[in-house]
Image: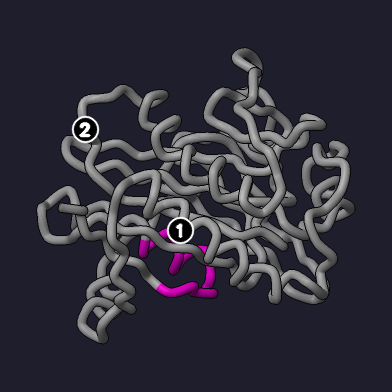
């Protein structure tokens, strides 16, 4: 009999709210109070997310803006380096940690991404960088074995984890129409992808197609049923009333 997972509808919200949700889902599963969950989301306003253990970043990152909007600066509950969330789509999975080590879990979870994007005509493979990534301020300028790249070496998906005794949270950013000039201005580096997946005007129309492909792949790869269930009012109150603040200092 297939395991049942919860599927949360696409949500657009600030980085602070999105990280609070992922942390709440992780804690709920860790405490045996919530089923495995798959969700997709976007960030509004655009944001930079810092890795949980990241200690240094430029002071001017606190004063960035894009098209008249200030960029949020938030800390993730997961590891890794800084990610720009503008023109991207984020996935998150919260499930059982199992007996595998972190790299094995990455491979197991990433399989649904590989299979889903394959149905969309994009072949992905794992990155190969093993040294030096921690010294690069941008997550997307290096591609480790936890990341997925296209045939030309462009990093399409960067993922990070938080591991508990029972729960694993893995979430990751998928580059769709991220502004290359904004990326370069922030990181003082060329954008590490050759072309954007879509034009900014096509971004919103493409997201449902991507989500459909990835949810179907998740069902097959994890042998699960997905039950769509938005957050209840009580759950929202619980998420927003609890403190999931990860200080930047």
Magenta-colored stretch includes residue 19: yes
Q: Give the range drawn in magenta.
A: 9-21
- Identify the residue shown where x is 36% and y is 31%: 105
Magenta-colored stretch includes residue 10: yes
Q: Residue 216 carries which label?
A: 1
Label 2, residues with CA under 10 Å away: few <14, some 14-19, many ≥20: few
Q: Could you tell me residue 210's position as x and y percent?
A: 60, 62
Q: Could you tell me residue 128's position as x and y percent?
A: 64, 18
Q: Could you tell me residue 13's position as x and y percent?
A: 52, 74
Query: Closer to the camera, 126 or 51?
Result: 126
Q: Which mark is residue 46?
A: none
Helix, strand or loop at mark 1: helix
Query: Closer to the camera, 53 or 161?
Result: 161
- Identify the residue shown where x is 68% and y is 34%: 149
Query: Closer to the camera, 41 or 44?
Result: 41
Query: Closer to the camera, 61 or 24?
Result: 24
Q: Could you tell me residue 163's position as x and y percent?
A: 30, 36
Mark 2–mark 1 CB contact (< 8 Å): no
Looking at the rendering, which quadrant does residue 189 occupy? top right
Query: Which residue is disc 2 drawn over?
Result: 98
């Amino acid at each position: 009999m297939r395991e049942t997972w919860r599927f949360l509808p696409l949500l657009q919200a600030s980085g602070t709210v999105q990280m609070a949700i992922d942390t709440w889902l992780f804690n709920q599963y860790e405490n045996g109070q919530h089923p495995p969950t798959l969700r997709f989301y976007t960030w509004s306003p655009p944001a930079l997310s810092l890795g949980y253990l990241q200690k240094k970043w430029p002071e001017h990152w606190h004063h960035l803006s894009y098209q008249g909007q200030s960029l949020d600066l938030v800390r993730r509950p997961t590891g890794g380096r800084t990610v720009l969330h503008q023109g991207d789509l984020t996935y998150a999975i919260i499930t059982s940690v199992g007996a595998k080590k972190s790299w094995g879990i990455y491979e197991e979870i990433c399989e649904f991404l590989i299979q889903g994007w394959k149905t969309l005509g994009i072949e992905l493979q794992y990155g190969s960088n093993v040294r030096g990534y921690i010294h690069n301020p941008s997550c997307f300028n290096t591609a480790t074995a936890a990341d997925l790249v296209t045939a030309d070496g462009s990093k399409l998906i960067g993922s990070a984890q938080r591991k508990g005794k029972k729960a694993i949270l893995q979430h990751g950013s998928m580059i769709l129409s991220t502004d290359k000039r904004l990326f370069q201005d922030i990181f003082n580096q060329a954008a590490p992808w050759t072309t954007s997946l879509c034009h900014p005007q096509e971004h919103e129309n493409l997201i449902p197609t991507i989500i459909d492909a990835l949810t179907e792949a998740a069902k097959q790869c994890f042998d699960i049923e997905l039950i769509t269930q938005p957050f209840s009012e009580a759950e929202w109150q619980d998420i927003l009333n609890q403190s999931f603040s990860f200080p930047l200092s």
